Amino acid sequence: MKQLTLFISAIFILFLCCNATDSNQTNNIKTPQTTNYKLLSLGDSYTIGESVCKTCRFPEQLKDSLINNTENTAFNLKVVATTGWTTTNLLNGISNENLPNNYDLVTLLIGVNNQYQGKDFSIYETEFPELVDIAITKAKGDKNRVIVVSIPDYAFTPFGNGNTTISSEIDAYNAFAENYCNANNITFVNITDITRNGLEDTDLVASDGLHPSEKAYSLFVERLLPYALEKL
């Protein structure tokens, strides 16, 4: 009887030790920490998302796509853009913002209003590089965290009505931007060809007959996402 009592006591002590070990192991399990990223998008109507919902514009769609394609991440998006802004307006707009220099990713899409308003091309040649430099500064001083996006072609909208002069001028702006980016090892993503389907695929044009639609911005993001993921 005494031996049985000692055996039961030993089993009970072993049970308590096992429970204590399991409890310690449970307490040592840590919940994965969320990595918070900061995203800055600079531009004009194509960045602010004229005539589409706030979550339909490409910076918002890019943010959501980044979250969906990464684990335990959160993104804080800042947009500095206004419909009608030229490169000059964007420079002034940025100077009026108290932007830190710690963004993990910066996008820049600018120039269509220089073309539309008939500004001298030399203004773009001077101010586009200035804006790229600012984007790099805001991106922790790292040019590898910057993405320059090509200018959409609004000739392929009901408003533009297939005007070939618009297209040739947009090409000149994009060629300058792309050449500058290539010469300085800055990522340049061409989305212009997507917008040149706008007269055939009317779903690519917003209800105002001029700006890209939510669908068009989704296609932009498909192009941008692989580059953005590489930069995080």
Image (cartoon, helix red, strand yellow):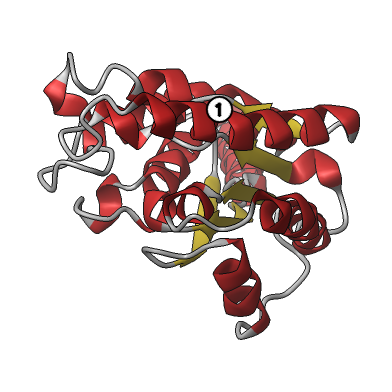
Residue appearing at x 33%, y 47% in the figure: 57
Side of 67 relative to 51 (left or right): right
Figure check: 11 above or below 53: above
Q: Nearer the viewer, residue 17 or 31?
A: 31
Residue appearing at x 70%, y 39% in the figure: 232
Residue 205: where, in percent of width, then height? 20, 34
Determine crowd level at label 1: few under 14, some 14-19, many 20+ residues with C-alpha closer than 10 A: some
Q: Nearer the viewer, residue 21 or 14?
A: 21
The image quadrant that residue 172 belongs to is top right
Residue 93 visible at all: yes
Residue 188: where, in percent of width, then height? 68, 30
Residue 24 visible at all: no
| Tag count | 1
Residue 115: where, in percent of width, then height? 50, 48
Residue appearing at x 55%, y 55% in the figure: 41
| Residue on which the image places disc 1 | 171
Side of 120 relative to 55 (left or right): right
The image quadrant that residue 82 belongs to is bottom left
Figure check: 152 above or below 128: above
Residue 118: where, in percent of width, then height? 49, 55
**Amino acid bearing label 1:** Asp
Figure check: 66 above or below 41: above
The image quadrant that residue 102 belongs to is bottom right
Q: Nearer the viewer, residue 61 or 20?
A: 61
